[in-house]
Amino acid sequence: MRLENLIIDDEERGVFRVRRRAFTDPEILQLERERIFEASWIYTGHESEIPSAGDYVCRRVAGRSLILVRSSDNVVRAFLNSCPHRGAAVCAAGSGNAKNFTCPYHGWGFANTGQLVAVPSQDDYPRSFQRADFSLRQTARCQLYRGFIFVNLDATITSLEQYLGGAKEYLDLLCDQSEAGLEMVSGHHLYSIRANWKLLAENTMESYHTPVAHKRYMGYMADRGVARKAMKRKGFGEILGQGHIAMGSAPPLGGKPIAYWSPLFPAQKKAEMQAVQQRLADKFGPEKAARMSQMSRNILVFPNLIILDLMAICVRTWFPVAPDYMEVSTWCLAPRDEDSTTRALRIDSFMSFFGPTGFATPDDVEILESCQHGYRNKEIEWSDLSKGLHKDKPTNADEAHLRGFWRQWHRLLTRSRDS
Amino acid sequence: MTEISAMVATRHDITRTMVEDFLYQEAALLDEWRLEEWLLLLSEDIIYEIPIIGMEQSSSDQTLFLLADDAQRLRGRVKQLMGTATWAESPRSRTRRMISNVRVRDAVRDELNVSANFAVYRIPQQSWRTEDGSNQTECFVGAYHYKLRSGETGLRIARRTVVLDVDVIRPHGKISIIL
């Protein structure tokens, strides 16, 4: 397998290119599964989705079927949804509350802590049979950071906090928006893109495409009274290390339900949002408060969690199924103590931009599928990511932070697992 | 009131056939991309929504739906769809709607609650999708729940709830048309 020459990273010559084979080769996807998805902390869900003992949600994560459950001992665990006996799924519902999970095949029953508690006709087993050998299998590790639940499939990598590193501060900026904490709004958007998974990382984490690909959202905002000059924003792109990247801009495009009014919102919300801004400034100081409430921000936690803190907070995760097909899942995150009118506004804002029916996502889906299709033209070997390469302070419309993602991707892909 | 007796109680002047004609006419306007004319079928308090399966009873104020448009948002949606910057519908896809099992569930004063089954096929037309014949025909299947209001100018749509039987939008990836 040739892994050399996947990237040209030459600052002196001002060249950064990615070989398009990285988006099309099944062998590269197999390596990504082993060296990236099975060797990273992967976002799985939010604590607020399983608030009470016994609550569970089923999630497909890195090709595994997981049951994410708050066990009776209040510990959050991630189980592989497969009976240790012969393999059937022990949980068929997508979410719910259960003290036990019972396999529909032979009736083995498991407590929500994973222990095997019922084996029909156990007397027929040899004396060496131990129930303790057949607990539901957990992922190697499952840890939380401020409500975000991550798993990893390889116990040898660093702890979640070390892994998150520079991304932690950005998660904090988000979580500090509410003293009561954040919660996932019920409901989800589950969709797909017939394109390589890395194209969505690129697409979500740069603003160069926004005025062109999202021209219709700009048009919609203009029709709703947003001044065209307010759509011209100043921003930054930042490499946070270990593949994590961030970008942001101000003022927030489309407003921000936490505390930045826009003509897209009802007029009576204006004073209310200014009051929240003031409250945040009193608590955190004007600088941090401005970062929280008057900036749009996207962060990518390597490899596949993106949180968009824009006109609503969108939590997005996605997995490759084939080199040219990914499955995307998104949720709407909100302050727990938000009043009902702001909550309604937030959800409405979310749907206006994000999701399979929004005024932005369908065009991204269309264009990414077109990119992937374009890679059939094998004569064109490289994609270019050199925008802003010569700048000291690259912006969100540059590609410096994307290069941070790609460098980490390349580092993990080309290392051997033992090193 | 049972559904049977509700049907008996349907306004004398509006028959199921008239409701069917109305739905077929609406489907034709959508299939023919006569979306500005379609807007004229909607009342000013229109809600057009696509809930997530299992959450049909909740409200889009508190639950994330796939879509929940009021009149203003819908006019914006139509303007974009008829414009040139909606890349997902540029060029416009061809669509074909099949509507059946139309039931007038109840009628109170000037309002009728109507349900119907649908299959909406979407065939994208981008050259790169059609050039090799694999143009990836999509099909959306589900039920419509309408609140129709009868007035001087005929029937108008006050609520249009689209309940998909699969709300995991895979492998479609998007719902870029009005379902």
Image (cartoon, coloured by chain):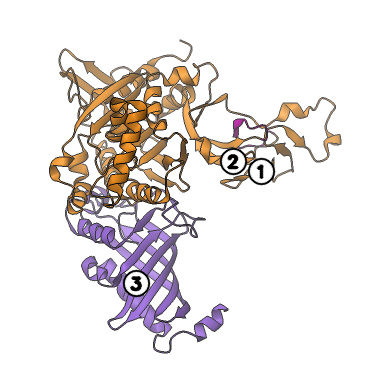
Q: Nearer the viewer, residue A407 or A348?
A: A348
Q: Are marks 2 and 1 on the same chain?
A: yes
Which portion, as a residue range, is magenta? A72-84
Q: Are marks 2 and 1 in contact (CB under 8 Å)?
A: yes
Spatial separation of the CA atoms under disc 2 and disc 3? 39 Å
> Mark 2 — residue?
A56
* Chain for numbered disc 2: A
Chain letter for purple, please. Answer: B
* Chain for numbered disc 1: A
Give the left or right position of residue A75, taking residue A253 as reference: right
Query: Picture coordinates of residue A30 (x, y %)?
Result: 44, 27
Residue drawn at x 57%, y 39% is: A51
At label 3, counting other C-alpha atoms closer than 10 Å, the crowd grade (few under 14, some 14-19, many 20 or more) is: many
Q: Nearer the viewer, residue A56 or A87?
A: A56
Chain letter for orange, please. Answer: A
Query: Picture coordinates of residue B127 (x, y %)?
Result: 21, 50
> Mark 3 — residue?
B157
Residue drawn at x 44%, y 21% is: A35
Spatial separation of the CA atoms under disc 2 and disc 1? 7 Å
Give the left or right position of residue B163, taking residue A324 as reference: right
Compared to residue A366, the image places residue A39 above or below, namely above
> Mark 1 — residue?
A98
Q: Residue furthest left?
A: A229
Q: Are marks 2 and 3 on the same chain?
A: no
Question: Can residue A69 be seen by looking at this rendering?
Answer: yes
Name the amino acid type tagged 2. Tyr
Q: Secondary structure at mark 3?
A: strand
Magenta-colored stretch includes residue A77: yes
Q: Are marks 3 and 1 in contact (CB under 8 Å)?
A: no
Q: Secondary structure at mark 1?
A: loop
